[in-house]
Image (tube, rainbow, N blue to C red):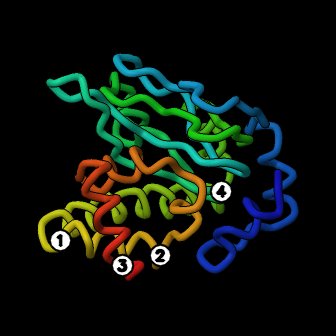
Amino acid sequence: MTNSFLNLYDSNVKLTESDIAFSTHYFEQDSASKNSIIEEENKVPRYLYFVTKGFMRLFYYDNNGDEITTLIVSPNQFVTSFTNFIHEVKSNENLECITNCEFFKIARRRLVELIENNENFKKLSLVIFEQSLTITQIRANDFATLTAELRYKKLVEQQPEIIQHVPIQYIASYLGIKPQSLSRIRKQIIK
C-alpha cells in the first residue's frame, strides 16, 4: 500500500501498523493504459479502485449515443459505480482511464471480509461511501444552482489538476455543457 492511501483518511480513521499489515493481502496493485475501459456498462462493478497515478472517469451513453461524464477522479481518490458496487447490480456506467493509471483494487467480497475482520477498515469504508454520497449531492446542487461558468470556476478552484490533465470534452461533459461553450467560458475568464 502507498503512503498516499495510508495517510488519506488519517484525520478520520487512524490506521495502526497492524491494520495496514492485515489489509495488504486484500488489495491488488494494478495498472491500465490510457483509454482503457476497466469496468463496462451492463455489468456488475467488480472492484473498488484507489487511484495512485493518473485520472479516471465514470461515463454513460445517453439516448443520442453521446457520452455523459458523471465523475472524474484524480490520484488519491476512490472510484467505482458506488451504488451498483454496494448492491451488486448492473451499472449503466463505464469506468475509463483517461490517462495511463496505476491503482489498488479490491473486490466487493474481499472488501466485505476486510471490514468484517477489521474495525478501523469498517470505519474507513463508511467514510469512503459517505464521501461518495456527498460528492453526488454537491454535484446535483451545483447543477441546480450554479451557472456553467460558476461550475467551471469551482472545478478550477477545487481540482486544478483536472483542468491540466483531462481533455476538454470530458470536462465539458462533466459540467453539463458542450465543448464549444466551455471554450468560450475559458476565453472569457482569461480576459
Labelled disc at residue 147: 1
Question: Could you say which is closer to the camera, residue 9 or residue 175?
Answer: 175
Residue 142 placement, left or right of 186:
left
Find residue 123 and report its horizontal and vertical position in percent.
Answer: 56, 63
Left or right: where 179 falls relative to 33: left
Q: Residues within 10 Å of mark 2 (few under 14, many from 20)?
A: few
In the picture, the quarter occupied by the C terminus is bottom left
Task: Residue type at mark 3: give it.
Answer: Ile
- The x and y percentages for residue 52 are 72, 51
CA gap, disc 4 to disc 2? 14 Å
Q: Is residue 150 left or right of residue 22?
A: left
Residue marked by disc 3: 189
Label 4 – label 1 distance at C-alpha:
27 Å
The kind of secondary structure element at disc 2 is: helix
* Tag 4 residue: 75
Quarter of the image for residue 28 reads top right
In this rendering, the answer to whether 94 lies above or below 99 is above
In the rendered structure, the answer to whether residue 176 lies left or right of residue 31 reads left
Q: Earlier in the sequence, mark 2 or mark 1?
A: 1
Label of residue 173 in the image: none
Q: Say which element carries label 3.
A: helix
Q: Are marks 4 and 2 in contact (CB under 8 Å)?
A: no
Of labels 4 and 1, earlier in sequence is 4
Neighbor class of circle 3 (other Cα within 10 Å; few <14, some 14-19, many 20+) is few
Quadrant in which residue 67 is drawn = top left
Q: Mark 1, mark 3: which one is toward the viewer?
A: 3
Return the residue at label 2: 158
Q: Earlier in the sequence, mark 1 or mark 3?
A: 1
Amino acid of disc 2: Gln
Identify the mark nearer the N-term, 4 or 3: 4
How far apart in space, not on screen, are marks 4 and 3 (Cα)?
A: 27 Å
Mark 4 burial class by Cα count in 10 Å: few <14, some 14-19, many 20+: some
